[in-house]
Amino acid sequence: QSYNPKRKIPRSEISMSDLELCLSKAAFSAAQRSASIHMPRIGQRSGSQRSEWYTIERLLRKYASLHGIDIFVYYFRRPSRQQTDSD
């Protein structure tokens, strides 16, 4: 799903328990295939608690070390409001 700044319905909050289950399964599967996980930074919203990302980062580190895999997180810069308003 692509990012749309004009979205009428806000995205739902991330359930940490569901995210942890997902990361556990993905890390286990990656370890079986000698693969790594590549993903965007998630859970970061303007106005949300900064600690949310750090909680997610701790989960990523936990499952990376538990299963001996590499996890790569990519940071995408969102366009500024001026760029999106002029489109």
Image (cartoon, rainbow, N blue to C red):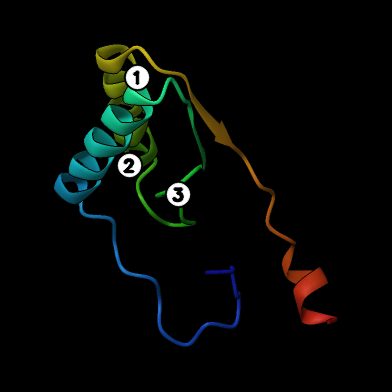
Foreground: disc 1 or disc 2: 1
**Contact check, label 3 and label 2, Cβ < 8 Å:** yes
- Residue pointed to by mark 1: 64
Return the mark for residue 44: 3
> In this picture, is 29 found above or below 1?
above
Q: Quadrant of the C terminus?
A: bottom right
Q: Is residue 26 above or below residue 82?
A: above
Q: Secondary structure at mark 3?
A: loop
Q: Going from the N terminus, do you reach mark 1 or mark 2 first? A: 2
The structure residue drawn at horizontal position 60% and vertical position 37%, both measured from the top left corner, is 74
Three-letter amino acid code of the residue under disc 3: Gln
Q: CA distance from mark 1 to mark 2?
A: 19 Å
Q: Position of residue 25 (x, y in %)?
A: 24, 38
Q: Which residue is mark 2?
A: 52
Left or right: where does residue 19 sit relative to residue 35?
Answer: left
Kind of residue at disc 1: Ala
Residue placed most toward the observer, 24 or 59: 24
Q: Amino acid at mark 2?
A: Glu
Residue 61 point in image, percent of width and height: 34, 20
Residue 14 is left or right of residue 57, and the answer is: left
The residue located at (80%, 71%) in the rendering is: 82
Of mark 1 and mark 3, the one earlier in the sequence is: 3
Q: Which numbered disc flags the more N-terminal residue, 3 or 2? A: 3
Image x and y of residue 36, in percent: 48, 26
For marks 3 and 2, give the CA distance.
7 Å
Query: Nearest the camera: 36 or 85?
Result: 36
